[in-house]
Amino acid sequence: MRTKLAAALLLCPLAFAGPAAAQPKVNLEQTFADSLQAMPKEELAVSGGFYVPAYSSVAMSQGKLRVDFSVTLSVHNASETQALVVRRIAYFDTAGKQVESYLKSPVAVKPLATISIFIPTDDVRGGTGANFIVDWAAAGEIAEPVVEALMVGGVANAHYAFISQGRPTRTVGKK
């Protein structure tokens, strides 16, 4: 029994890891300076939101094994001509409790540019039902942003990667 446990710990140390401490705050304004521009001066007449499922941990092997994943949330401005204002990026755990908020104030993403949030594999605060809420706005008609979460992880020699697409929760104004 002791040898099996030792072998399991060597083969899959992440399956027995506890929740990670809070990760250092990412500064989107610095990290993605080349993707950002000045806020539009016009009134933000169009706004919307996305719900993005994410999985920092997944149960496998009849629920006896937990595999942890890194999560990259990407917010893509799909417009070729207009800035996308990102008002909020919030990360929630399985119980619906907010784990992290990533913006101090709104940012304007250049046309066709992207910003992203990275959550490392050892940060399992989100759990099996983690999710993001992303609120956005624009000065006028704009292509709807593309918001996705990419999860990457593995156990032993098996590696997994999958994408979860954001689902619009609301759109206000002309699109």
Image (cartoon, rainbow, N blue to C red):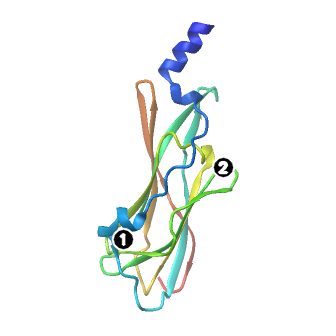
From this viewpoint, is residue 113 visible?
no
Q: Secondary structure at mark 1?
A: loop
Q: Give coordinates of residue 105: x percent, y percent.
A: 50, 74
Q: Quadrant of the N terminus?
A: top right
Q: Nearer the viewer, residue 126 or 174?
A: 126
| Secondary element at image label 2 | loop
Q: Is residue 120 left or right of residue 83?
A: right
Toward the bottom, the furthest residue is 42
Residue 171: image x %, image y %?
A: 55, 77
Camera sees residue 155:
yes
Give the amino acid at mark 2: Thr
Pick whichever, 123 or 58, lies toward us. Answer: 123
The residue indicated by pointer 2 is 94
Single out the residue that lies furthest toward the right: 95
Q: Position of residue 68 (x, y in %)?
A: 52, 37
Vertical position of residue 139 compared to residue 124: above or below: below
Q: Amino acid at mark 1?
A: Ala
| Along the line of sight, the residue nearer the viewer: 50 or 29 | 29
Q: Along the polypeptide, which appears first: circle 1 or circle 2?
A: 1
The residue to which callout 1 is attached is 78
Q: Residue at x 40, y 86 (%)?
A: 40
Q: Residue at x 41, y 64 (%)?
A: 28
Q: Viewed as shown, does residue 134 lie left or right of 150?
A: right
